[in-house]
Image: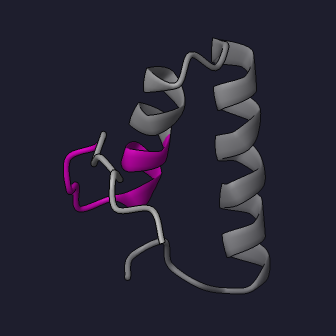
Protein backbone atom coordinates (compact mmCIF):
# COMPACT_ATOMS: atom_id res chain seq x y z
CA UNK A 1 0.00 0.00 0.00
CA UNK A 2 1.30 3.42 -0.92
CA UNK A 3 1.60 5.40 2.31
CA UNK A 4 3.05 8.45 0.58
CA UNK A 5 -0.32 9.37 -0.91
CA UNK A 6 -0.78 13.10 -0.94
CA UNK A 7 -4.17 14.70 -1.31
CA UNK A 8 -4.16 17.17 -4.18
CA UNK A 9 -7.77 18.28 -4.23
CA UNK A 10 -10.03 19.96 -1.74
CA UNK A 11 -13.27 18.27 -0.80
CA UNK A 12 -15.94 19.93 -2.85
CA UNK A 13 -19.65 19.34 -2.89
CA UNK A 14 -19.39 18.37 -6.58
CA UNK A 15 -16.98 15.50 -7.37
CA UNK A 16 -16.78 16.68 -10.99
CA UNK A 17 -15.17 19.90 -9.75
CA UNK A 18 -12.63 17.79 -7.87
CA UNK A 19 -12.02 15.79 -11.05
CA UNK A 20 -11.42 19.00 -13.01
CA UNK A 21 -8.99 20.29 -10.36
CA UNK A 22 -7.11 17.00 -10.22
CA UNK A 23 -6.74 16.83 -14.00
CA UNK A 24 -5.54 20.44 -14.10
CA UNK A 25 -3.00 19.79 -11.33
CA UNK A 26 -1.70 16.77 -13.24
CA UNK A 27 -1.15 18.89 -16.33
CA UNK A 28 -3.84 17.58 -18.66
CA UNK A 29 -4.78 19.87 -21.55
CA UNK A 30 -8.03 21.83 -21.44
CA UNK A 31 -9.40 19.79 -24.34
CA UNK A 32 -8.66 16.52 -22.50
CA UNK A 33 -10.27 17.84 -19.30
CA UNK A 34 -13.35 18.85 -21.24
CA UNK A 35 -13.57 15.37 -22.81
CA UNK A 36 -13.12 13.56 -19.48
CA UNK A 37 -15.84 15.67 -17.85
CA UNK A 38 -18.19 15.15 -20.80
CA UNK A 39 -17.76 11.37 -20.81
CA UNK A 40 -18.10 11.12 -17.03
CA UNK A 41 -21.24 13.27 -17.08
CA UNK A 42 -22.76 11.25 -19.93
CA UNK A 43 -21.98 7.97 -18.16
CA UNK A 44 -23.57 9.18 -14.91
CA UNK A 45 -26.64 10.28 -16.85
CA UNK A 46 -26.80 6.88 -18.59
CA UNK A 47 -26.70 4.95 -15.31
CA UNK A 48 -29.07 7.49 -13.74
CA UNK A 49 -26.71 8.28 -10.88
CA UNK A 50 -25.61 11.49 -9.27
CA UNK A 51 -21.92 12.32 -8.97
CA UNK A 52 -22.52 12.88 -5.25
CA UNK A 53 -21.31 10.16 -2.89
The image quadrant where one finds the C terminus is bottom left
Q: Is residue 31 magenta?
A: no
Left or right of 38: which side holds 3?
A: left
Q: Which residues are magenta?
A: 9-19
Q: Residue at x 69, y 57 (%)?
A: 40
Q: Position of residue 24 (x, y in %)?
A: 48, 23
In the picture shown, does residue 2 fall above or below 16? below
Q: Position of residue 43 (x, y in %)?
A: 77, 68
In the picture shown, does residue 2 fall above or below 26? below
| Rendering colour mode | one colour
Q: Residue at x 48, y 46 (%)?
A: 19
- In-front residue for pair 42/23: 23
- In-front residue for pair 30/4: 4
- In-front residue for pair 6/32: 6
Q: Is residue 14 magenta?
A: yes
In the picture shown, does residue 6 fall above or below 31? below
Within the image, what quadrant is residue 31 found in?
A: top right
Q: Residue at x 27, y 48 (%)?
A: 7
- In-front residue for pair 7/12: 7
Q: Residue at x 67, y 72 (%)?
A: 44
Q: Looking at the image, how many numbered discs can be counted on the residues?
A: 0
Q: Position of residue 25 (x, y in %)?
A: 43, 23
Within the image, what quadrant is residue 29 found in?
A: top right
Left or right of 14: which side holds 25?
A: right
Amino acid sequence: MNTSYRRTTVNSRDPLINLRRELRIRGFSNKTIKSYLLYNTNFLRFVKKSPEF
